[in-house]
Amino acid sequence: MKTERELLKLAAKACGGEITGWTDNGVPHNPFSGVHQLFWHPVRSVVDMVWVAEKLGMTIDYRDCSVSCRWTAQDGEQLYFINCWGDILGTAGDAVLRTAAEIGEELP
């Protein structure tokens, strides 16, 4: 299982960026130029979550007590699904992060 840092690095890679620094509490410095925020974290920030989902063309669905994040590759569909019984936005951010990390892992 990948650490949060590994997932964040891969997600940034999927979006065309590279994380070059971290805060003391493990939040990465924003790897994207032209973005006004100093830090970037798609699980802790709804703005970052939506930005990543839109940048990569993901679909986020909320149903009952679950969140699914869908991304369609050229060779078919990949789906990351996660159950949610608490913080639905944090769970959606986690789904987006993990889906983006899988995309980033496939890149050279």
Image (cartoon, helix red, strand yellow):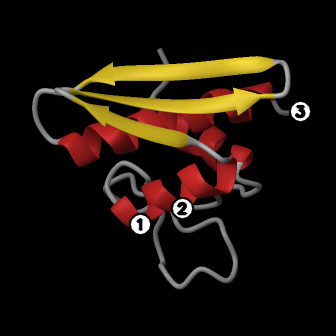
Is the residue marked by circle 1 packed among few (<14), some (14-19), or many (20+) residues within 10 Å? few
According to the picture, the residue beneath numbered tag 1 turns out to be 47
**Is residue 58 shown above or below 52?**
above
- Residue at the extreme right of the image, as rendered: 108
Secondary element under disc 1, as helix, strand or loop, is: helix
Residue sitting at x 84%, y 19%: 75
Left or right: 40 in relation to 102: left
Secondary element under disc 2, as helix, strand or loop, is: helix
Inter-mark Cα distance, 1 to 3: 27 Å
**Is residue 74 shown above or below 57?**
above
The answer to whether the residue labelled 2 contacts the one labelled 1, judged by CB atoms less than 8 Å apart, is yes
Residue sitting at x 55%, y 30%: 70
Inter-mark Cα distance, 3 to 2: 22 Å
According to the picture, the residue beneath numbered tag 3 turns out to be 108
Secondary element under disc 3, as helix, strand or loop, is: loop
Point out residue 37 in the picture as x, y percentages from the top left corner: 48, 79
Q: In which quadrant of the rendered view does residue 101 lie? A: top right
Left or right: 45 in relation to 40: left
